[in-house]
Image (spheres, helix red, strand yellow):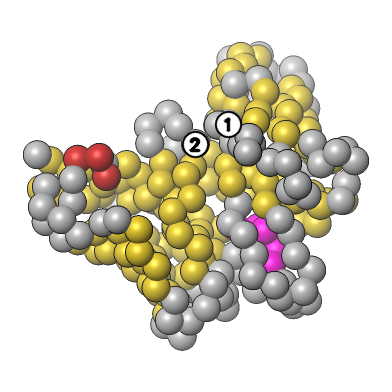
Amino acid sequence: ELKVEQNPLFLSMQEGKNYTIYCNYSTTSDRLYWYRQDPGKSLESLFVLLSNGAVKQEGRLMASLDTKARLSTLHITAAVHDLSATYFCAVDPLPTYGGATNKLIFGTGTLLAVQP
Amino acid sequence: KAGVTQTPRYLIKTRGQQVTLSCSPISGHRSVSWYQQTPGQGLQFLFEYFSETQRNKGNFPGRFSGRQFSNSRSEMNVSTLELGDSALYLCASSLRVVDRIIQETQYFGPGTRLLVL
């Protein structure tokens, strides 16, 4: 059974600090996604990582993918209060026929609270 | 361009009833996926439709069904509602690929919040 594990589940950090959220998955995949969810809202796409070694950055967030280790990281630099949200990673398991399944398996989410 | 839209946004039903939720994908997107989000189980994949055909299905009972129309709009239906079906139902659309072409991410709609009493 495919499992996607995130840690930590909850992260309280001060503004200006750096931290990393980890996403481990248990099956072969070269497609990993990061989403953000604000309370009571839907999911906002942050990053799409489509190959081993992929690194993407947007503002204070940077995501990377290591398909050999089955690990993705979301690094937060100099956190600000506006980054407070729940962050999900999601994996699209490789189908036998190639391409993509569009069947995303989500991690448990990391609730990030940035304190002033 | 307009995003994914879902209707209704909120719904209250009683046990045993059935419900139909609607999703209109982003213009040009032909793949629609449905997810259920609950505090206990998190985000779980329900099914995916492409060109009016169900391509993938998650581990949900047969009470959960869906369909897709020729204009890519999709509906999901839950029959004989149970208390545990209370959840946020999210629809996502994307450009589906057949060969290994770089795939766009899935874009999520605002969701339908279903409460079963």
Of residue A81 and residue B28, the one placed in the foreground of this image is: B28
Amino acid type at circle 2 is Ser
Q: How far apart are the alpha carbons under marks 2 and 1?
A: 6 Å
Of residue B4 and residue B111, the one placed in the foreground of this image is: B4
Where does residue A56 sit, x and y in percent of width and height?
Answer: 40, 68
The magenta stretch is: A100-104
Return the chain for callout 2. A
* Mark 2, other Cα within 10 Å: few <14 / some 14–19 / many ≥20: many
Q: Name the residue under label 2.
A: A42
Q: Assign the magenta stretch its main secondary structure.
A: loop
Q: Mark 1 points at which residue?
A: B111
Q: Considering the numbered disc 1 on the image, is that residue within a helix, a strand or a loop? A: loop
Where does residue B25 sit, x and y in percent of width and height?
Answer: 71, 39
The N terminus of chain A, quarter of image: bottom right
In this image, A8 relative to B46: left or right?
left
| B14 lies above or below A17 | above
| A108 lies above or below A29 | above
**Residue A82 bears which disc, if any?**
none
Residue at the spot x=43%, y=81% of the render? A53
Q: Specify whether residue A2 is in view.
A: no
